[in-house]
Image: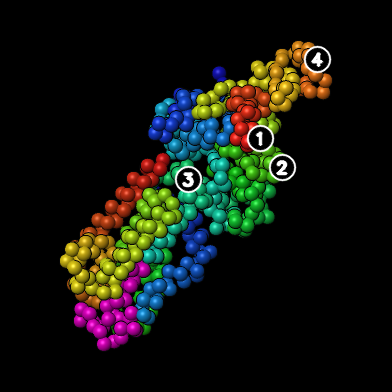
Amino acid sequence: MPDYVIQAENITVRYGDFTAVNDISVSIEKGEIYGFLGPNGAGKTTTTKVLTTMMKPSAGTVTIGGHSSSANAREARQLVGVVQQHVAVDKDISVRENIICRAMLHKVPRKEIEFRMKELCDVIGLTPYMDRTVQELSGGWKRKLAIVCALMHNPSILFLDEPTAGLDTQSRHMLWDIIHVLNKRGTTIFLTTHYMDEAEALCDRVSIITHGVIHDTGTPRELCEKLGRFTVEYSSESGSKEYRFFDTRESAKEFYDTLPEGSAVVRGTHLEDVFLERTGRTNTKALEKALRI
Amino acid sequence: MMGIIEDIFRVALSDLYYLKRNILPLLATSMITPFLYLIAFGYGLGDGVTMGGVSYIAYMIPGVVALTTLTSSFTTISNKLMVQKRFYESFDEMMLCPISKASIILGKAVLGVIKGMLCAFILLGIGMFMTDDLQITPLLILMILLSCIVFALLGVAAGMIVSDIPRMNLFNSFVILPMTFLCGTMFSSDRLPFVIQQFIEALPLTQTSSLVRSCALGWDFPWLALVVLIGYGVLFYALAYWALRKSN
């Protein structure tokens, strides 16, 4: 039986008549990197808020490390570190002051704060920036500060809500390295993202959510195989891109050979293909109409 | 009890760092308006005017001190909380920490209380040079502290309830600004129409003016004002608590 650190069952979140999250269940194993994928407005952030005790669901139960998020919220919170989508730190005080404040709020013993701050900042590379105010830092460094703040109380689960959104390539890869290092040190990671390459590079298991409903869960490889290991990408008569998925290279090649020369390619299926098939590709006709082409 | 005090300090710490970094501009901006009131009304009206048996300047200084506790404590907290909630989003992080709602509310009020007290002391210091009628007593300091706590709690409640800056400005223009002029801070409300007078009598700044003035000038202590002001403190705390629960 897997050792689950988070178990959410039949979670529903309603805002008036609108259902943001509809009867979803999520189980996260100890030590895994779990990806929660979905387009904008799919319900990722709302689910994250429920799983981190920031929001009470309209229905359903959440257990974090064996503690109910409603009955034992304080105990559950001690196990959780959260890096929100927007870097949620005080911008008008220094990096060091922000870290100390967060540690104090999580009741880290004072004599441990200095040691832990130094250890984490050395690992993440924040040490040279300790006395700068947050508003002096670039986006990537702000994000790293948010990660250090989230880790100060030594949580066993780290939630990262779109941690690389808006960052340049170097900063994204730096954050990926940090996520790998933290995971190797034993931290379970819950990652929401809409970058499929990120999910493919980092996650042991992913779920795809759209319109508040989970459509699929599995390892990136399993999801790709479920759709078909090989993809034929070709242009239709109207000029739009079309995709067909096949279990074997031979069947993909067979279909490829029926297409006009130079109009198609055969390639391996990516998580992005799975994501787009589950969440919907661009409606080209609607787009052309909207752009009045 | 020590646990609650420690938690209040934990919540207040980021605001205290902010105060340490910005103490001069924060105090200067809070002091300029009451200082101008003292110059314009105090010296402008001159020594010839008396109110309640004392010189106008002696009458006015406790009122301006009361007024400053409102503007300093309330504005600092409501603005800071608005920024932390809407722009920095750091307030949400606090909700994830194992800290009680009571400690969050009281901890957030600390910055307003400290700033209000500092401004009040500076004004009293200036007032001592302007008149000999002021009496600085422990009771006066206690009343100023109570006033700062009540208005800081109003700031926390407003910061939690009001959703954006235009609405906060609306609250400032239609609630805080009228209180500034009408609640017996610089003039007695005796000559105002009866209905307005009754309404003004019920407002918290009127109670503060009355308490601070009575203590500073050695008048009879207005016990009813003390009870009403404590009642306002409880009301503002309850409002903040309700808003905090609702936001979760």
Q: Amino acid at mark 3?
A: Asp
Dot 4 and dot 3 within a common chain: no
Instruction: Please provide the residue range marked out in magenta.
Output: B41-69
Q: Residue at x 68, y 38 (%)?
A: A176
Q: Residues within 10 Å of mark 4 (few under 14, many from 20)?
A: few
Q: Chain of mark 1?
A: A
Q: Quadrant of the C terminus of chain B?
A: top left
* B21 in magenta: no
The residue pinned by badge 4 equals: A257
Q: Amino acid at mark 4?
A: Asp
In the image, taking residue A251 as reference, residue B165 lies left or right, namely left
For the residues labelled 1 and 3, the Cα–Cα distance comes to: 45 Å
Q: Amino acid at mark 1?
A: Ile
Main SS category, magenta section: helix
Q: Chain of mark 3?
A: B
The residue pinned by badge 2 equals: A169
Q: Residue at x 52, y 51 (%)?
A: B88
